Image (cartoon, rainbow, N blue to C red):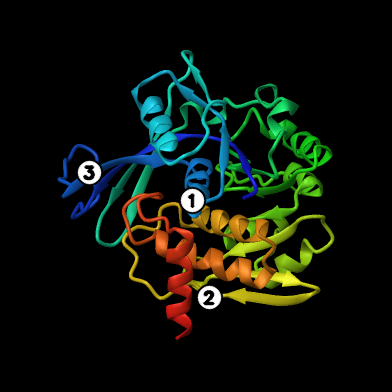
Amino acid sequence: MKKVLVAGEINVDLMLLGSRIFPAPGKEVVANDVELVLGSASAICAMGLARLGTPVVFIGVVGADTWGAFCLETMKHAGIDVSRVRSDCAQKTGVTVAISSPSDRALVTFLGATGALGAEDISDDVFEGIAHLHVSSFFLQEKLRPSCRALFERAHRAGLTTSLDPGYDPNERWDDDLLATLSEVDLFFPNEVELCKVVHQDDIVGALHALEHVHAKTVAKLGAQGAIALHRGEVVRAPALAVQPVDTTGAGDSFNAGFLHAWLEGSSLADCMEFAAACASLSTLGVGGTARQPTRQETRAALAQGRA
């Protein structure tokens, strides 16, 4: 199997489940359950790849604290090489508190070490034996962002292919540095909202056409509607599996993992999209982004059942 390097952020998700209503200022509500799970787009993607059987090396920064240790132990247990993750005494590991009710959920995030990874943490020797570099959370990785294009360029010179999931821009500026970075990206994985924001269009197909001139192949995630891309100017779609989701946290990151796994095996664009959409769907059957990420065999079985 080809090995993937994931460069990105690591944090925990504290999930308060089954609250009847959301809390109002000065008031208290009771949740039915609580889970502490591994969070962050980069780490969830890495876990999904490992679950599918793709070897993963992770490079990032956590705080030298209990939450950081929890994250690293979880990733190590999944078979991910975390020897290049730096524990920083000057940082706190990031955390997202998710409060869910039957109708919706609310999130509060402390970024912590999310933006602490810099280009100086990623030397060229880390590319040895690696086939592909993936980066998530372009807008949150504030220290890495200015040198992200140069990082991908270095990876290309070393013979790697590259992919990028931008995540949402919390400042909603959608600056042109992302578009410039795509000149060194092979696979671009925005969701529908992110793609339309990046090119300042409201129509998803029009947004895909707007990026036809860039180097990156854009595959847009549509949630319960699956995924969409262009191939030689024609629209390609892949449906999601028909499931009853428990929690959609990290489904897009599991999509990325599924697509990369299939793509590195040499599958066609349509097959990669179908496999990725199935991975994303199956990941929603558990709480948190990693609890129900499927194996390769589980994904293939689900696809075969859907075709029957």
Which callout, 2 or 1, points at the residue further toward the start of the chain?
Answer: 1
Query: Farthest residue toward the front?
Result: 1
The answer to whether the residue labelled 2 contacts the one labelled 1, judged by CB atoms less than 8 Å apart, is no
Q: Amino acid at mark 1?
A: Gly
Secondary structure type for disc 1: helix
Direction from residue 1 to residue 77 in the image, left or right: left
Question: How far across and how far down the image is residue 34, in percent?
Answer: 22, 43
Q: Nearer the viewer, residue 274 or 185?
A: 274
The answer to whether the residue labelled 1 contacts the one labelled 3, judged by CB atoms less than 8 Å apart, is no
Q: Nearer the viewer, mark 1 or mark 3?
A: 1
Question: How far across and how far down the image is residue 10, in percent?
Answer: 48, 34
Residue position for label 2: 239
Residue 48's mark? 1
Query: Farthest residue toward the bottom?
Result: 308
Q: Amino acid at mark 2?
A: Pro
Label 2, label 1: how far apart the Cα atoms are: 19 Å
- Which image quadrant for residue 292? bottom left
